């Protein structure tokens, strides 16, 4: 910790300038350089950052008239961030980038077209069952989305069920963190999974490959062992994506316990 030497211009220093910080100890002023910690990011973080850069590039390449069209649509789209003030709305740029990310999460990354925003129906999920298939975890949830729309939620490979078939374009995305029964939420450990629709109108599946290694559960959940079953807790944030527009709903969250 080098000692700061006063001069004719400055007898003392506080704060930071560039990569140097000044601090005081025992009435004396010292300085030190800031650490240059480099965190390259996980593969998933790097992938998401690359998608975001491509979304920004795609926006910049749009014709100005198309950007104005996005801005006009966005005037009717409320913000997902607090405070939820009905008098405010997001920008056309934010709506475009959100739609771009929505398509990317569905495995269909491309430049979205401006389309009217339709409010999402009410929806919630509840845990039904959890099953281990070799090293993977299959979790089944019930959803009440069909009851709030009056229309069935069907699998993409089923035949059309009339003019209201568009509800099948709504897909659940779940961000999960699985931990021991008393573990708290750690957002940095959440991983995103696209749900699989089923033939039942009110059920969805989420398949988590190699789930124990994802959250290092072999050592962290020994205390949750009950009989021949292992008990876990899942913290979940979930939302909907419209596969026709790329638009995403506001997030909801639940925490559930299950045994496998």
Image (cartoon, rainbow, N blue to C red):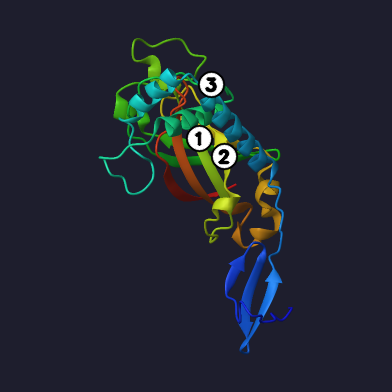
Residue 167: x and y in percent read: 39, 21
User: Could you give the CA–CA distance between mark 3 and mark 1, rounded to whole angstroms?
Assistant: 20 Å
Residue to which mark 2 is pinned: 192
Q: Position of residue 24 (x, y in %)?
A: 61, 82
Q: Toward the viewer: 26 or 144?
A: 26
Q: Is residue 58 above or below residue 227?
A: above
SS of the residue at dot 2? Answer: strand
| Quadrant of the image occupied by residue 231 | bottom right
Contact? badges 1 and 2 (CB < 8 Å): yes
Farthest residue to the right: give it.
2
Q: Nearer the viewer, residue 197 or 27?
A: 27
Q: Name the residue at 68% across, 65% down.
A: 34
- Residue 111 got which mark? 3
Name the disc covering residue 173, or none.
1
The disc placed on residue 162 is: none
Disc 3/disc 2 C-alpha distance (Å): 22 Å
Residue 196 seen in this snapshot:
no
Quadrant (top left/top right/bottom left/bottom right) for the N terminus: bottom right
Q: Look at the numbered discs 3 and 2 and tell me whether their residues touch, using CB distance below 8 Å.
A: no
Q: Residue at x 28, y 44 (%)?
A: 85
- Describe the element under mark 3 as helix, strand or loop: loop
Outermost residue, front direction?
8
> Could you say where residue 91 lies in the image, as x and y percent from the top left?
39, 34
Q: Is residue 96 left or right of residue 69?
A: right
Compare marks 3 and 1 and give the one earlier in the sequence: 3
The residue closer to the viewer here, 245 or 52, is 52
């Amino acid at each position: 910790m080098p000692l700061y030497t006063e001069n004719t211009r400055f007898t003392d220093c506080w704060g930071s300038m560039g990569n140097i910080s000044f601090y005081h100890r025992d009435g004396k002023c010292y300085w030190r350089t800031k650490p240059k910690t480099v965190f390259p990011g996980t593969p998933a973080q790097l992938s998401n950052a690359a998608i975001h850069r491509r979304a920004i590039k795609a926006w910049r390449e749009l014709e100005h008239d198309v950007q104005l069209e996005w801005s006009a649509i966005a005037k009717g789209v409320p913000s997902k961030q607090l405070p939820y003030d009905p008098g405010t709305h997001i920008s056309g740029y934010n709506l475009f980038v959100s739609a771009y990310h929505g398509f990317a999460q569905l495995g269909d990354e491309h430049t979205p077209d401006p389309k009217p925003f339709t409010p999402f129906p009410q929806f919630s999920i509840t845990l039904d069952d959890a099953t281990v298939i070799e090293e993977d975890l299959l979790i089944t949830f019930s959803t009440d989305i069909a009851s709030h729309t009056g229309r069935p939620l069907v699998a993409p490979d089923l035949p059309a069920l009339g003019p209201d078939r568009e509800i099948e374009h709504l897909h659940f995305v779940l961000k999960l963190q699985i931990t021991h029964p008393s573990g708290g939420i750690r957002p940095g450990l959440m991983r995103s999974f696209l749900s699989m629709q089923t033939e039942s109108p009110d059920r969805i599946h989420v398949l988590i490959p190699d789930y124990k290694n994802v959250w290092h559960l072999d050592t962290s959940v020994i205390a949750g062992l009950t009989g021949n079953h292992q008990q876990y807790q899942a913290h979940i944030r979930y939302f909907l994506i419209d596969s026709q527009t790329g638009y995403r709903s506001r997030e909801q969250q639940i925490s559930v316990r299950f045994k496998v």
